[in-house]
Amino acid sequence: MDRPIGYWVKHLDNLLDDAMGQALAAYGTSRRDWQLLSAAARDGSAAMLAPFDGVEEAVQSLTSKGWLADGRLTDEGRAAHAAVSEHVMHFRRRITEGVSPQEYLATVDVLRRMAANAER
């Protein structure tokens, strides 16, 4: 606890970005590509990603792969999502090893509330 939360949030984000990039390299995708692919598979929309950098590039990347057309997943995109999802789930299990489900949910809740406070 020798460093503030901002340090740990940014440090973890950088580590996750690097590790996720390595994990997704086999699919020729980036972390942002995966986030867009996942959002499109979940609700057909990338609107939740709009505030983040790199969304337009991810749309172009997934479109060029044939995984996205007119902002929607293609059949090929759904198949890619299924394959990449398995890989990502393995990655997430490894990253959260030793963290209980309750600890994870509590951490997400605290970060969500802090973000809401900062947005006010």
Image (cartoon, rainbow, N blue to C red):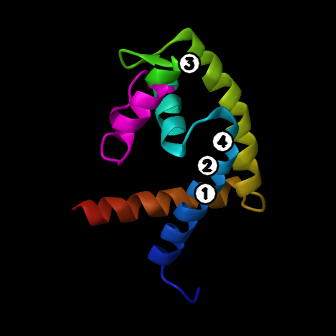
The numbered disc on residue 77 is: 3
Query: Which label sits on residue 21?
Result: 2
Alpha-carbon span between mark 4 and mark 2 = 6 Å
- Give the residue type that dot 3 points to: Gly
Location of mark 4 (residue) = 25
Q: CA–CA distance between discs 4 and 1?
A: 11 Å
How would you classify the magenta stretch by its main secondary structure? Answer: helix
Which residue is found at the position 48% from the left and 68% from the top? 10
Q: CA distance from mark 1 to mark 3?
A: 24 Å
In magenta, the rendered stretch is 42-62
Q: Which of 19 and 109 lies nearest the eye of the viewer?
A: 19
Q: Give the mark nearest the N terminus, 2 or 3.
A: 2
Which structural element holds mark 1?
helix
Image coordinates for residue 2, horizontal then vertical, percent: 57, 89
Marks 1,2: beta carbons within 8 A: yes
Q: Position of residue 59 (x, y in %)?
A: 40, 30
